[in-house]
């Protein structure tokens, strides 16, 4: 899961709201939604020229993405037009926004408010995202968030696993990361970061 540093509400969006006085999310048309997605992807969700879904870290595009209300609009109706509650998420139908729907839990790791790095890490053998801590509130929050977004969907774990395999080799039963390879690949950014941090020293042996 990626941290999102939200900018202030963009001017074009403030102007649209002033002009159209939207009463609900339905009042935002295709055009303004496209513009919003483009703005968020370009300014808040871009790493090395690629755009990412902050929840699953799959690569997305302006066309293949959707605006996600982090705090669902059914439960937080006043936030339907609140820019700081938006992110641009993937369209995968078994994870992220589509799975989350209008589910909400106060333990949800909101990537705008919290740094997901403090809550999650990965299992190198299974490709699963796992809680960083074994107990306590951080553990509870990580588990709840993984459940709500279905972040250990089989297909997603397989993709993480093949990313790990493609960038590593096995030496004496240990997984050794190919740093030179990995440096130039922008995929699963926090998994990449985790691999570089945790498997780096082994390459020196
Ligand atoms: Zn996603």
Image: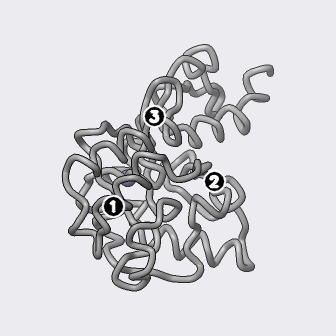
Q: Nearer the viewer, mark 2 or mark 1?
A: 1
Residue 159: give x, y in percent of width and height.
Answer: 37, 42
Query: Considering only vertical position in the picture, is 92 above or below 168?
Result: below
Q: In the rendered structure, find residue 95 and report the number of the disc placed on it.
A: 1
Q: Please tell me which of labels 1 and 3 falls first in the chain.
A: 3
Q: Which residue is mark 3?
A: 42
Residue 29: give x, y in percent of width and height.
Answer: 20, 56
Q: Nearer the viewer, mark 2 or mark 3?
A: 3
Which quadrant of the structure image shows residue 161?
Answer: top left
- 142 left or right of 20 in image: right
User: For the view shown, which residue lies furthest in the top direction?
Assistant: 180
For mark 3, does the 10 Å Cα neighbourhood hold few (<14), some (14 to 19), or many (20 or more) residues?
some
From mark 2 to mark 3, how far is it between C-alphas? 26 Å
Q: In the rendered structure, find residue 121 and report the number of the disc placed on it.
A: 2
Label 1 CB less than 8 angstroms from ligand 1: yes
Question: CB atoms at circles 2 and 1 under 8 Å apart?
Answer: no
Describe the element under mark 1 as helix, strand or loop.
Answer: loop
């Amino acid at each position: 899961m990626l941290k999102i540093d939200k900018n202030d509400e963009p001017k074009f969006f403030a102007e649209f709201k002033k002009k159209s006085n939207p009463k609900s999310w339905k009042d935002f048309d295709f055009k303004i939604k496209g513009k919003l997605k483009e703005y968020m992807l370009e300014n808040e969700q871009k790493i090395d020229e690629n755009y990412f879904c902050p929840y699953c870290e799959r690569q997305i595009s302006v066309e293949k993405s959707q605006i996600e209300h982090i705090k669902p609009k059914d439960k937080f109706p006043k936030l339907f037009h609140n820019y700081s509650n938006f992110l641009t998420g993937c369209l995968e139908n078994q994870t992220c926004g589509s799975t989350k729907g209008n589910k909400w839990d106060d333990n949800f790791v909101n990537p705008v408010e919290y740094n997901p790095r403090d809550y999650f890490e990965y299992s190198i053998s299974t490709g699963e995202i796992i809680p960083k801590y074994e107990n306590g509130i951080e553990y509870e929050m990580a588990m709840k968030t993984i459940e709500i977004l279905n972040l250990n969907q089989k297909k997603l774990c397989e993709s993480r696993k093949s990313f790990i395999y493609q960038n590593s080799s096995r030496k004496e039963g240990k997984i050794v990361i190919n740093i030179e390879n990995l440096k130039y690949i922008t995929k699963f950014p926090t998994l990449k970061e985790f691999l570089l941090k945790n498997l780096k020293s082994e390459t020196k042996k």
